[in-house]
Image (spheres, grey):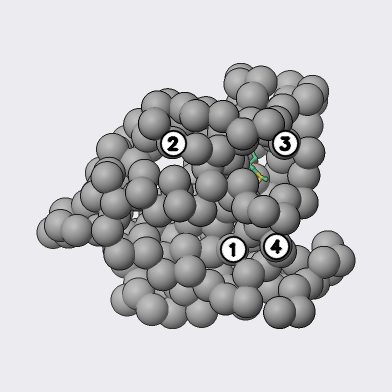
Amino acid sequence: MQRPKRPKDVSARRHDLFDAALRTFVPGRLVDLGAGHGGFSLRAARAGWNVTAIDARDERFPKDDAVTWVRQDVREADLSGYDLILCLGLWYHLTVDDQLDLLKRMSGTPVILDTHLATEQPTHDLSDPVEERGYSGRFYAEKGWWNRATASWNNTASFWPTPESFYRMLAEYGYPAVFAGTPWVTTDRTFFICTPAVANR
Ligand SMILES: C[S@@+](CC[C@H](N)C(=O)[O-])C[C@H]1O[C@@H](n2cnc3c(N)ncnc32)[C@H](O)[C@@H]1O
């Protein structure tokens, strides 16, 4: 399978997958976790969603009042009352405990989740295989996280589960049906539509 490698292709492919995933939902209230540059929040707002964007760093938030911009650690965010949660480019900057806690708080709400995983063809330097809380994966070292706008917030090593562990983790925390966007963005990254077992509403 031909997969995009250059950053330009990655960005275009991410937009294609995001727009297609978003179109499968009826617009309502949406929260974008780890929104960063805010580009996906704005795309959602333009598609008719009422958008709240959350990030621990606010320096890249665009000056655009189509979105409510909130500077906050996602580990402290109240995720109730939304029709859809975006978790794009964030999952692979969290520890396994934070991933599991986030899943508990998201559970019952559909999620569009874009992440790298510990596949057989990683695009980043990762640790040797590890077992964390019963899940297989590898660690990603968050070097210089404190002065990198796209990095983790306050943790030095993030957990990248294997695809098998990722799907099991989702199933065990309320998302038994997961749809993966294909072709993948890279050999270790794509978008997942995570559908809750029991909806909040
Ligand atoms: C790789 S960027 C992703 C930006 C955008 N969502 C995207 O997909 O292109 C990761 C973002 O997550 C934010 N982030 C990382 N850990 C966070 C946390 N615990 N709470 C809030 N934001 C966090 C970073 O500040 C950064 O803006």
**What's the residue at 56%, 29% (across, down)?**
130
- Tell me the crowding category of disc 4: few under 14, some 14 to 19, or many 20 or more residues within 10 angstroms, Cα based: many
103 versus 4 height, above or below: above
The numbered disc on residue 135 is: 2
The numbered disc on residue 187 is: 4
For residue 65, say whether it is visible: no
- Badge 3 residue CB within 8 Å of ligand 1: no
56 left or right of 199? right
Sequence-first tag of 2 and 1: 2
58 versus 14 height, above or below: above
Sequence-first tag of 3 and 1: 3
39 left or right of 33? right
Find the distance from the CA under tag 2 to the CA under tag 1. 20 Å
Relative depth, front residue between 95 and 18: 95
Q: What element does badge 4 sit on? A: loop
**What's the residue at 27%, 58% (across, down)?**
176
The quarter of the displayed image where residue 30 is located: bottom left
- Tell me the crowding category of disc 1: few under 14, some 14 to 19, or many 20 or more residues within 10 angstroms, Cα based: many
- Which residue in the structure is indicated by mark 3? 126
Sequence-first tag of 3 and 4: 3
Q: What element does badge 1 sit on? A: strand
- Tell me the crowding category of disc 2: few under 14, some 14 to 19, or many 20 or more residues within 10 angstroms, Cα based: some
Q: Are circles 2 and 3 on residues that touch, CB within 8 Å?
A: no
Callout 1 amino acid: Thr
Q: What element does badge 3 sit on? A: loop
Question: Which circle, 3 or 1, is nearer the viewer?
Answer: 3
For residue 22, say whether it is visible: yes
Find the distance from the CA under tag 3 to the CA under tag 1. 18 Å
- Badge 1 residue CB within 8 Å of ligand 1: no
- Which residue in the structure is indicated by mark 1? 190
